[in-house]
Amino acid sequence: MLTQEVSTLGRTRRALTQEFKREAVTLVAENGHPTAQVARELGLPPNLLQRWTQEVARDPVAAFPGKGRRTPHDEELARLKRDLARVTQERDLLKRVAAYCAKPSP
């Protein structure tokens, strides 16, 4: 199975499998077919196939991780963003408390 239908908020789109993506990149890389031609034959935007080719070139093993699987770098980035949001909320709360405490009593 190369594609599967995914329904999101009432809209259906096709989800391309890892196998399909790797085969498309193989057509471009190993067989020497032009990216635009392969993309057109597969019904894909050429820039998408180009992005897949670059992803495989960067890291062939970790390319197309699938649902919910992040690279260690992406996982750390997400953790740091969560920490930053929490610390920002704490800082804003402390600013409000400090401003309230600094007001002169009536």
Image (spheres, rainbow, N blue to C red):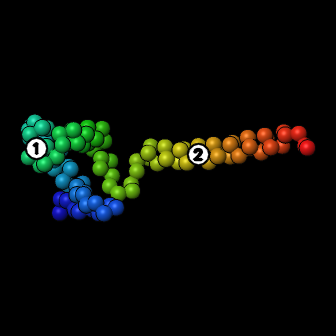
Residue 68 locus on image (x, y percent): 39, 56
Foreground residue among 37 and 102 = 102
Which residue of the protein is positioned furthest toward the right in this rendering? Answer: 106
Mark sitting on residue 60: none
In terms of image quadrants, where is residue 80?
top right
User: The disc labelled 1 sits on which kind of residue?
Assistant: Arg
Q: Which residue is mark 1?
A: 40
Residue 97 locus on image (x, y percent): 77, 45
User: Does 102 sit left or right of 59 as displayed?
Assistant: right
Look at 32% across and 47% down and name the residue there. 62
Disc tally is: 2
Foreground residue among 30 and 92 = 92
User: Can residue 93 be seen in the rendering of this structure?
Assistant: yes
Q: Secondary structure at mark 2?
A: helix
Q: Which residue is mark 2?
A: 85
Graded by Cα atoms within 10 Å as few (under 14), some (14 to 19) or many (20 or more), the crowding at tag 2 reads few
Residue 30 locus on image (x, y percent): 12, 40
Foreground residue among 100 and 51 = 100
- In the image, residue 15 sits, relative to residue 30, either above or below, namely below
Foreground residue among 44 and 19 = 44
Look at 17% across and 63% down and name the residue there. 1
Residue 6 locus on image (x, y percent): 27, 62
User: Does 57 sit left or right of 89 as displayed?
Assistant: left
Q: Quadrant of the C terminus?
A: top right
Q: Secondary structure at mark 1?
A: helix
User: Does 81 sit left or right of 86 as displayed?
Assistant: left
User: Can residue 26 be seen in the rendering of this structure?
Assistant: no
User: The disc labelled 2 sits on which kind of residue?
Assistant: Ala
Graded by Cα atoms within 10 Å as few (under 14), some (14 to 19) or many (20 or more), the crowding at tag 1 reads few
* Dot placed on the residue nearer the N-terminal end, 2 or 1: 1
